[in-house]
Amino acid sequence: MTDVFTKRQRSQAMSRVRSRDTKPEWILRCGLHRLGFRYRLKNSHLPGSPDIVFPKFHAAVFVHGCYWHRHSGCKDASTPKSHVDFWERKFNANVERDRRVMRQLDSLGWRVLVVWECELTRKTFETIHRVADFLSHGKACFDNSMKQHELLAVAEKKVRYRISSYDEEPEVSEE
Ligand SMILES: [Zn+2]
């Protein structure tokens, strides 16, 4: 981050969108674990350090924040009203890096899925379901009512974003 912003301006721009914790990702991990999927976190030896990696399925999942990764058409991907050029350059670089990472993973034979944070917070159950389908090529066993029940229990624990107050210095991960 350059110093074109005062600390307060930067906080304002960032706090609008980024929760301090990574609750959506946690919810997803918890749900998948209950469905029996085993994973590793932040595999830094892979391009882009995917958030969740499933070695058995040779699959990687990114949980992308809508703002930094520019979820197309999403209301969480607004652009700050000031320093527009700065932000657009920054956002474009993020998007380009994401594309590059996808290509690299693909060329290494990894299957990759991007999950947006807004999906996890607003359609928690469906999104966990979708990831499970992706991992298992549609063969995940959901006819087990216990598993459905477990998954719903996780979905119901979803917690809304906690938006940092403007005076806090948000911890922003731009990875
Ligand atoms: Zn979104």
Image (cartoon, rainbow, N blue to C red):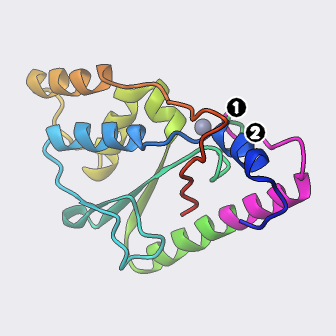
Q: Amino acid at mark 1?
A: Lys
Q: Residues within 10 Å of mark 1 (few under 14, many from 20)?
A: few
Measure how far apart labels 2 and 1 are at the Cα level.
Answer: 6 Å
Locate residue 55: give its quadrant. bottom left
Q: Is residue 86 left or right of residue 29?
A: right
Q: Is residue 18 above or below residue 124?
A: below
Locate residue 153: give its quadrant. top left
Q: Nearer the viewer, residue 15 or 152?
A: 15
Q: Nearer the viewer, residue 15 or 79?
A: 15
Q: Which residue is mark 1?
A: 75
Q: Residues within 10 Å of mark 2 (few under 14, many from 20)?
A: some
Q: Nearer the viewer, residue 136 or 63?
A: 63
Q: Residue at x 33, y 70 (%)?
A: 43
Residue 70: where, in percent of width, then height?
A: 68, 49
Q: Is residue 72 left or right of residue 136?
A: right
Q: Is residue 79 left or right of residue 161?
A: right
Asked if labels 1 and 2 touch by Cβ distance under 8 angstroms, the answer is: yes
Mark 1 close to ligand 1, CB under 8 Å: yes
What residue span does the magenta drawing correspond to?
Answer: 75-94
Q: Is residue 167 magenta?
A: no
Mark 2 close to ligand 1, CB under 8 Å: no
Residue 7: where, in percent of width, then height?
A: 73, 52
Q: Which residue is mark 2?
A: 78
Residue 40: where, in percent of width, then height?
A: 24, 62
